């Protein structure tokens, strides 16, 4: 049994706490905010995420809150034509062993939080802002913003895009600003006309923009997300946006897509950021996880999925005494770096070449997508949705 510190109480931090506590370790989660909570809107969960969540013991709770959609639909936002769709019901589940679903971010976070609160080996501490660390022989000390110091056998940096642990461990400066601005809104389902309540993840793609919508929160609300490649240079997160500004940012939208965009309420703005993949996630008894290790753009819909994969593999590898934690953390980093780097880079390319294509590139994209059968599409996503090798080190929970 070891004492493990986790900086960050988000999805990745709580998932890591559950994975480590299942191995019998004592885990302390240090969250800078006063309370453990999550903000945001809808997210997508692939079969790989559900496999990881099952191993963490919260898969059913997340399923109970999820919406199981019928298909992923790709629309040409310029012409309004349906280009392609990938069914994600019976054949998809048979292929990958788990469903594809959409949830409000809170509906993933709360099952993790509730499980962590129930576990006797996990302590959750708010108002504990980790700003750095010091290492000693056989231990590591988390340094807090108010001068307090906490020492454990390992420190996991799950403190997000602007990770203080990464800043010290990697030292690669500020995140990369993508230049893409996203506007998000969640509206009550009763505000959506019945003919627009599609049980799909629908994406309308146009030159340098796209618009996505789908039901969340058990079908009680509808998630809207509109993205514009507008060359934004400053990172912002959760800033209110005027309704007319959002509408005027997407003059090309028409028909059903326009009707939905006009329904948006209380819009919030983010400028999307990520980082380049790096080869070094660990230093001694310190390791990175989730967005602190591999922040990625939204376009592959895998940010949360990859964080819970990290948590499962980390827990499996730290299934033993603290004496060899340094070597086991290095093995964790080596096992996860290639896969997460591939997802990071694919997400960038999807935003650049698939979603936002214009001119001849748009025509070629439509021809390529429309030529694919459902089986072809499953083959293309199998490396991502069907790869469960992150559980190779799992064993019966302690």
Image (spheres, helix red, strand yellow):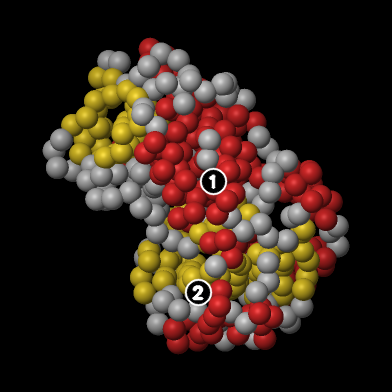
Dot 2 falls on a residue whose secondary structure is strand
Q: Position of residue 359 (x, y in %)?
A: 71, 76
Residue that badge 2 annotates: 187
371 with respect to 350 (left or right): right
Residue 110 appears anywhere in the view: yes
Residue lying at 56% horizontally and 74% vertically, measured from the top left? 189
Query: Where, quadrant-wise, is the N terminus in this rendering?
Result: top left
- State the mark number for residue 171: none
Residue 155 appears anywhere in the view: no
Residue lying at 78% horizontally and 43% vertically, measured from the top left? 95
Query: Does the CB distance between marks 2 and 1 fall below 8 Å?
Result: no
Residue that badge 1 annotates: 61
Q: Is 161 located above or below residue 316 in the figure?
A: below
Dot 1 falls on a residue whose secondary structure is helix
Q: Looking at this view, is 101 or 257 the one in front?
A: 101
Residue lying at 24% horizontally and 25% vertically, measured from the top left? 151
Callout count: 2
180 with respect to 158 (left or right): right
Within 10 Å of disc 1 (Cα), the crowding (few <14, some 14-19, many 20+) is some
Q: Is 171 located above or below residue 373 in the figure?
A: above
Q: Position of residue 227 (x, y in %)?
A: 53, 71
Within 10 Å of disc 2 (Cα), the crowding (few <14, some 14-19, many 20+) is some
Which numbered disc, 2 or 1, marks the residue closer to the eye?
1
151 with respect to 355 (left or right): left
Q: Earlier in the sequence, mark 2 or mark 1?
A: 1
Label 2 to label 1, Cα distance in Å?
23 Å
Q: Position of residue 52 (x, y in %)?
A: 58, 37
Residue lying at 60% horizontally and 32% vertically, measured from the top left? 390
Q: Is 200 located above or below residue 389 in the figure?
A: below
């Amino acid at each position: 049994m070891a004492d493990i510190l986790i900086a960050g109480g988000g999805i990745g931090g709580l998932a890591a706490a559950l994975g480590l506590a299942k191995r019998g370790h004592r885990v302390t989660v240090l969250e800078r905010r006063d309370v453990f909570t999550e903000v945001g809107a809808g997210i997508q969960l692939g079969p790989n995420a559900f496999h990881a969540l099952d191993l963490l013991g919260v898969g059913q709770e997340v399923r109970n809150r999820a919406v199981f959609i019928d298909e992923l639909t790709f629309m040409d936002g310029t012409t309004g034509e349906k280009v392609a769709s990938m069914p994600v019901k019976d054949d998809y589940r048979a292929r990958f062993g788990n469903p594809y679903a959409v949830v409000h971010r809170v509906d993933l976070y709360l099952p993790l939080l509730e499980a962590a609160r129930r576990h006797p080996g996990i302590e959750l501490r708010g108002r504990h802002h980790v700003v750095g660390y010091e290492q000693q022989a056989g231990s590591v000390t988390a340094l807090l913003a108010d001068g307090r110091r906490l020492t454990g056998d390992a420190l996991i940096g799950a403190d997000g895009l602007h990770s203080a642990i990464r800043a010290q461990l990697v030292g690669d400066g500020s995140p990369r600003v993508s230049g893409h601005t996203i506007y998000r809104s969640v509206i009550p389902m009763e505000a959506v006309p019945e003919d627009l309540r599609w049980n799909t993840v629908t994406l309308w793609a146009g030159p340098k923009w796209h618009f996505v919508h789908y039901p969340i929160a058990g079908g009680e609300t509808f998630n809207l997300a509109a993205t514009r490649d507008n060359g934004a240079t400053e990172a912002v997160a959760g800033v209110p946006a005027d309704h007319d500004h959002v509408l005027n940012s997407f003059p090309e939208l028409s028909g059903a897509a326009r009707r939905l965009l006009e329904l948006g309420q209380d819009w919030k703005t983010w400028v999307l950021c990520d980082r380049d993949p790096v080869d070094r996630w660990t230093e001694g008894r310190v390791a990175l996880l989730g967005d602190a290790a591999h922040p990625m753009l939204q376009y592959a819909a895998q940010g949360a999925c990859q964080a819970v994969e990290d948590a499962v593999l980390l827990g499996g590898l730290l299934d033993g005494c603290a004496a060899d934690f340094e070597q086991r953390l290095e093995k964790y980093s080596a096992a996860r770096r290639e896969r997460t780097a591939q997802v990071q880079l694919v997400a960038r390319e999807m935003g650049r070449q698939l979603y936002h294509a214009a001119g001849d590139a748009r025509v070629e994209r439509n021809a390529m997508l429309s030529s694919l059968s459902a089986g072809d599409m499953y083959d293309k996503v199998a490396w991502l949705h069907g790869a469960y090798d992150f559980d190779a080190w799992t064993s019966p929970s302690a």
